[in-house]
Image (cartoon, rainbow, N blue to C red):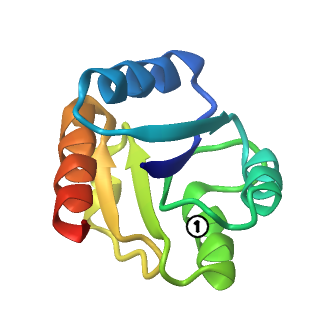
């Protein structure tokens, strides 16, 4: 069972990710929030027990990269995944991001989770 926190302000996109995860072979717990402040609240509430954090880049209050930097400062082993509809962000260097995904290909995000989970078991 993997524990996933998704920080995404677009409800429809969160719903899409949830549906794709449910259609996958993954056994997962998913916590969904719409901003980085609530993300940190849930991250702390669950005592840093998430395996993956999926964060949109463009969020209210703080961008996803800065949010993931804070997360990594508390748990260095957590896998931080950044998503965005702006594909030009993919070419930038984000030291606290383990992988970048385009919103136009969210299925690759689910395949990554399936592959990574299978390899690490």
Q: Would residue 48 appear left or right of 80 to someone viewing this image?
A: right
Mark 1 — residue? Answer: 68
In the picture, which quadrant includes the C terminus?
bottom left
Residue 15 sits above or below residue 102 on the image: above
Residue 83 sits above or below residue 98 on the image: above
Q: Is residue 81 something that shows in the picture?
A: yes
Residue visible at 32% across and 35% down?
103
Q: Residues within 10 Å of mark 1 (few under 14, many from 20)?
A: many
Whole-percent x and y of residue 45? Answer: 82, 56
Residue visible at 16% across and 54% down?
115
| Residue placed most toward the observer, 109 or 102 | 109
Q: Is residue 55 something that shows in the picture?
A: no
Q: Quadrant of residue 64?
A: bottom right
Q: Would residue 46 appear left or right of 81 to someone viewing this image?
A: right
Residue visible at 26% across and 58% down?
117
Whole-percent x and y of residue 39? Answer: 72, 50
Residue 34 sits above or below residue 11 on the image: below
| Residue placed most toward the observer, 94 or 24 | 24
Q: Would residue 51 appear left or right of 105 to someone viewing this image?
A: right
Whole-percent x and y of residue 8? Answer: 58, 36
Q: Secondary structure at mark 1?
A: helix
Residue visible at 33% across and 70% down?
92
Q: Quadrant of residue 85?
A: top left
Q: Quadrant of residue 19?
A: top left
């Amino acid at each position: 069972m993997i524990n996933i926190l998704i920080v995404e302000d677009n409800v429809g996109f969160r719903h899409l990710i949830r549906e794709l995860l449910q259609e996958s072979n993954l056994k997962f717990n998913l916590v969904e929030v719409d901003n980085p402040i609530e993300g940190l609240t849930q991250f702390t509430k669950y005592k840093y027990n998430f395996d993956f954090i999926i964060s949109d880049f463009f969020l209210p209050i703080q961008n996803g990269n800065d949010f993931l930097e804070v997360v990594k400062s508390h748990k260095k082993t957590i896998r931080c995944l950044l998503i965005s509809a702006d594909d030009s962000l993919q070419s930038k260097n984000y030291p606290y991001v383990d992988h970048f995904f385009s919103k136009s290909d969210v299925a690759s995000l689910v395949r990554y989770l399936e592959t990574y989970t299978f390899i690490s078991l």
